[in-house]
Structures are given as C-alpha cells and as structure tokens.
Image: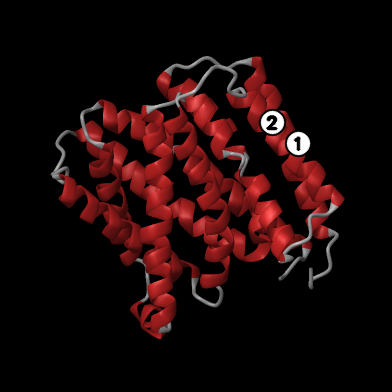
Amino acid sequence: MESSDASVGRATLLIILSALSFGSISVLTVLVITAGVPLLTAMAWRYALGVILLGAVARPRQLRAIPRQRVIQLLVIGGCGQALITYLSLHALEYIPVGPLAFLFYTYPAWVALLAAIFRTEKLTPMRAIALTLALAGVTIIVGAPTEKLNPIGVMLALVSALLYSAYLPALEHVQEGVPAVAATFLLVAGAAIAFVIAALFTGELFLPTGVAVWSGILALALVSTVIAFLTLIKGLAVLGPVRTSIVATVEPFFTATLGVLVLGNQLSTGTLTGGILIAAAVLLIHWNSTQLSPTV
C-alpha cells in the first residue's frame, strides 16, 4: 500500500470529497421524496442515470479486460451490498429521526477498526484509536446521542446498515484491486441500479417522474451522490485502506448538517461546529499518522 506524503494527502482529499458527495444524499432525497416520488423510484433513477453518466466515460476495452469473476463480484457488491445499505439506512427514517439514525450509522468506523483488528488486516495503532475516538465524539456531538426511547425497528435497521457497511468497505477494497477506478465504479453502480430497478418493478413503484425540480434532484443524486461519490471513494480507499477511510469519512455528517442549514433551513448549532472541529482534528491526525507509516504498512 503506497504511503508517500503526496499519495496519502491526495487520497485523504478524495475521501473527503467522497464523504461530502455522500453527505448530500439525505437532503437531496428529502427534496425528491417530498415532491411525491417514492424512495425506490428515486433510487432506481438515481443509479440508472449514474450508469449512463459513467458509461459515457468508461472505456469498453478496460471493461472487457476485467476477469468475469471480478465483474460478477463488483455487480453483486453493488446490487446486494450497496443497494441494501442504501435502502436500509434511508428506510430507517420512517421509524427514527435523522439524528439518531446518523449516530447509529456512524458507529461503522468503530466496527471497521474492530473487524480489521480481529482479522489482522490493519493494525489499530494508538494514534488511530485516538483519531477514531475524536471522530466518533464529533459525530455524537453533531447528531446528538439518542436519549429518548427509539423504535426498535429503526434502531435495528440503522445498526444493520452500519454493520453491513463495515464489511462492505474491506470487501470493496479487495474486489476493486487492479481494476481501473472508472470501470470498477461503473460495475458497482450498475449492480445497485439493477437491484433498485427490479425492486421498484416488483413493488409497482417504477414510473417516470415529472417536474424540473424533481429531475434536478435526481440528476444531482446521480452525478454528485453516486458518480463522484463512488469514484472518489474507490480511488481513496485503494491508498488509505478501510480503517483510515472510515475515520476520514466522518466529515460527512458535519457537511450534511451544514447543507441542511443552507437548503432545508435547519439551524446551525454550537454542537455542530464543535463536532466539526473534533472531526477535522481526527482527519488531520490520521493524515499525519499515515505519512509516518512505511510503505509496507
């Protein structure tokens, strides 16, 4: 794993960009659903448009050069992994508020670090442990730890999605190894598109939405929250690995909270700013620690 200052810095920026892109999902999804588009319909068109956009830049020669087994693995991870994580996490909003959902979902960096330590794929160094603590503390302050009695169904959906994501990141790192980033992203998004289109057809929710505002939101979901988000995630993950990637990605709830202020009119609290500072400190610590590692770590 390459660990030069330049490559780690570039990868860290890519993961931050990915987290910011993923951070727009909840706000954009709320806007689309509020306009009367069901969740499955919105996600089906989001990923379908993502496939079209990626298909315009993907090189057919690179796609044909990928071994068939690797193609199937990426499609399955996208269709069974990413699609399921997306649906479960957004479906949880029907049972619990967005704050507790975010707090429960963003326990995944701890699960990633724990799994990596158990399977001895990455070391949980003292510096990483401190950064993980700072990141989780920042997320907790931003979204607020759930203190009220929560619907157990929503809690279960949020925790399952977090656990799935903690397994999804190392699996994605392994499967996309040696595959060009655009080609890997195309197959991953295609798998998710197939899953959501089939689900929407099965439930009778697949239809062509109308309205400029609706399609603007869906296009933003496809371009920003899908194409840019996954492409930068895959590129950054290849350098940082799942543990460092998951910690850096905790900038996402801070951006989501800020975007909620700008788009949905939510209030920017002192807790959001404090949490953002802690997360920024965690990211800087991870970046500094990463540049100290030898290339073989």
Residue contact at pointers 1 and 2, CB within 8 angstroms: yes
Residue drawn 43% across the image and 63% down it: 77
Say which quarter of the image contains residue 294. bottom right
Q: For mark 1, give the secondary structure.
A: helix
* Residue annotated with mark 1: 134
* Residue annotated with mark 2: 138
The quarter of the rendered structure image containing the C terminus is bottom right
Residue 85, given in percent of the width and then of the height, sits at 43, 48
Q: CA separation, marks 1 and 2?
A: 6 Å
| Nearer the observer, 87 or 9 | 87
Q: Residue flagged by tag 1: what amino acid is it?
A: Leu
Would residue 248 be visible to someone looking at this image? no
Q: Residue flagged by tag 2: what amino acid is it?
A: Gly
Q: For mark 2, give the secondary structure.
A: helix
| Nearer the observer, 61 or 193 | 193
> Label for residue 282?
none
Residue 124, given in percent of the width and then of the height, sits at 79, 55
| Nearer the observer, 268 or 177 | 177
Residue 282 vertical placement versus 228 (above, below): above
Residue 164, given in percent of the width and then of the height, sits at 51, 52
| Nearer the observer, 280 or 127 | 127
Say which quarter of the image contains residue 143. top right
